[in-house]
Image (cartoon, rainbow, N blue to C red):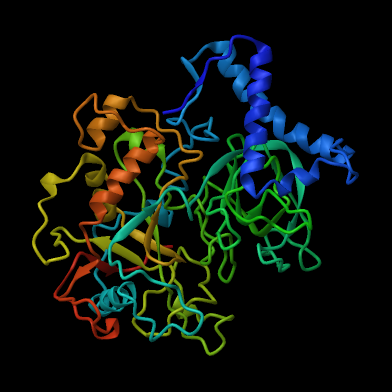
């Protein structure tokens, strides 16, 4: 594992911070971002805009490295076992009001009469059935197992700053858009004025323009969380977005922006969209390090599947019957027209007895403590359908910001390893925990049915299911 040794002087700190910032820029997109620094002439002298931009990007890194050097908090300044942009504040879990959908127990919720049919339709979709998915459809990898997003297509969380920034409402494809009435704009694209970030930020990857580019700016004083979809933190020389996974000092553009008070119900008014396809907050249902530090996930989870139900003749105006509280709308592209497809806001609950991909009973005593914690949350609180995805996806905080305040011995216990086992190079504690959870979730399908490679997924059958669809949350 490559590490950077503790610098011996302030000058060393300055040099290291500058080197890391430059390395990040050069590795981003073949160096095209460096063009922002120059004055456009034949030399590389910085322009006034470049001076301002480099200051904004360098100072936050310098502050991080100087504080670590000054306090001598470890033998290394930066190692592969630390997040890139560690979150330096705690979130008051469980989030949202006690009576909100996100904190309602699911243990007594009644199973819906159509639960079996809805699970079958979902199983077929996860096996690759696109017969009810109008073009374009998600590319599904024939994988009927849950997966917890933790690196790409998930949610990084950053501290909001004291100032405000002007952000254009434009997605990664260059399309101008609208916000919901909570952030009114008079013309398409805005711009809107929202909180700045208190340091460097990085929207979720992958490092492409087909990324969701989600990002949360949270103010611990006001309890407001600003949600961004397809947030742009870096532009190319032509002013086009470089997409997700790019580190920057400010948010230039975003396809959608919304905000929520995490002390509130965690819902939007009916028909409102948000940074999620269904109008829900990005923090709602997200698994956080604080949950694991407390030893329980004491709230509902959120999940995504390839195509939620949309039966409207005009899919851009969904039917009220196609979304349920806490969702306020549903997806208007990449949808499913099957009457028994899961609808936005519907709630899944894990059954008491589980089977594996061969239909055999699973001995949960052989699973690690982190998996027990996850499964208990699915039984106690359930999970709400909040977005579209190419798989059966759940969400954990992005490893680029998540900080798990446990010792390595505690992490080893959590993932079922002997104390003292190395967590491995290039992984944070959070990475190690979620990776183990994903490994064991790969043994638990949404349902079991006889399956042969090459068969038509639209004709797949199931003989046992691990999930059931239960009644919606109460307002």
Question: Which residue is drawn at the image coordinates 29% and 28% (left, top)?
Answer: 422
Q: Residue furthest top?
A: 8
Q: Is residue 199 visible?
A: no
Quadrant in the picture for residue 56: top right
Q: Where on the picture, by quarter, is residue 105?
A: bottom left
Image position, residue 360 (x, y; %): 8, 63
Q: How many marks?
A: 0
Query: Relative to the observer, which residue lies in front, 208 or 397?
Result: 208
The structure residue drawn at horizontal position 24% and vertical position 86%, both measured from the top left corner, is 459
User: Measured along the vertical axis of the image, is residue 250 above or below residue 3?
Assistant: below
Which residue of the protein is positioned furthest toward the bottom in this rendering? 313
**What residue lies at 52% left-to-right and 68% top-to-bottom?**
328
Give coordinates of residue 325: x percent, y percent: 45, 66
Q: Residue at x 30, y 74 (%)?
A: 127
Q: Nearer the viewer, residue 424 or 52?
A: 424
Relative image position of residue 413 (x, y in whole percent): 23, 31
Q: Is residue 12 visible?
A: yes
Examine the rendered structure and indicate whether residue 166 appears above or below residue 64: below
- 67 w.r.t. 88: above or below: above
Quadrant occupied by the C terminus:
bottom left
Q: Is residue 189 above or below residue 138?
A: above
Asked whether 426 or 297 is in front, the reply is 426
Tell me if 401 is positioned left or right of 110 in this view: right
The percent coordinates of residue 69 (x first, y second) are 58, 14
Quadrant of the frame with the N terminus: top left
């Amino acid at each position: 594992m490559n590490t950077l040794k503790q610098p011996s002087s302030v000058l060393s700190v300055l040099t290291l911070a500058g080197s890391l910032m430059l390395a990040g820029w050069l590795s981003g997109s073949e160096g095209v971002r460096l063009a922002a620094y120059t004055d456009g002439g034949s030399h590389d002298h910085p322009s006034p805009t470049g001076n301002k931009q480099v200051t904004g990007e360098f100072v936050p890194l310098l502050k991080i490295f100087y504080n670590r050097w000054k306090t001598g908090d470890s033998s290394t300044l930066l190692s592969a076992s630390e997040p890139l942009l560690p979150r330096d504040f705690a979130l008051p879990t469980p989030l949202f009001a006690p009576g909100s959908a996100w904190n309602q127990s699911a243990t007594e919720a009644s199973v819906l009469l159509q639960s079996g049919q809805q699970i079958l339709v979902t199983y077929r979709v996860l096996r690759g059935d696109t017969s009810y998915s109008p073009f374009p459809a998600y590319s599904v990898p024939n994988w009927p197992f849950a997966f917890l997003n933790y690196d790409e297509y998930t949610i990084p969380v950053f501290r909001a700053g004291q100032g405000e920034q002007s952000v254009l409402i434009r997605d990664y494809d260059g399309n101008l858009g609208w916000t919901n009435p909570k952030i009114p704009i008079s013309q398409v694209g805005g711009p809107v004025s929202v909180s700045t970030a208190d340091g460097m930020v990085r929207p979720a990857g992958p490092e492409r323009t087909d990324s969701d580019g989600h990002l949360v700016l949270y103010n611990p004083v006001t309890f407001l969380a600003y949600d961004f979809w397809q947030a742009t933190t870096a532009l190319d020389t032509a002013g086009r977005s470089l997409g997700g996974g790019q580190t920057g000092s400010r948010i230039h553009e975003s396809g959608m922006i919304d905000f929520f008070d995490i002390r509130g119900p965690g819902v939007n008014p009916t028909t409102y969209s948000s940074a999620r396809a269904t109008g829900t907050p990005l923090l709602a249902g997200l698994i956080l390090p604080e949950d694991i530090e407390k030893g329980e996930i004491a709230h509902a989870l959120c999940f995504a599947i390839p195509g939620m139900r949309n039966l409207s003749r005009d899919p851009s105006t969904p039917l009220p019957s196609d979304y349920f509280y806490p969702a306020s709308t549903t997806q208007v592209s990449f949808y499913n027209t099957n009457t028994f497809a899961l609808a936005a806001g519907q709630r899944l609950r894990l059954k008491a007895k589980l089977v594996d991909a061969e239909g055999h009973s699973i001995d949960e005593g052989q699973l690690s403590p982190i998996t027990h914690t996850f499964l208990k949350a699915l039984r106690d609180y359930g999970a709400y359908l909040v977005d579209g995805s190419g798989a059966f996806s759940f969400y954990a905080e992005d490893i680029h910001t998540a900080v798990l305040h446990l010792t390595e011995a505690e992490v080893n216990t959590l993932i079922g390893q002997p104390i003292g086992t190395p967590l491995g190079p290039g992984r944070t504690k959070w990475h190690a925990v979620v990776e183990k959870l994903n490994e064991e979730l790969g043994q638990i399908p949404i349902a079991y049915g006889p399956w042969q490679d090459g068969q038509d997924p639209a004709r797949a059958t199931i003989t046992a299911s691990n999930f059931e669809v239960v009644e919606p949350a109460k307002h």
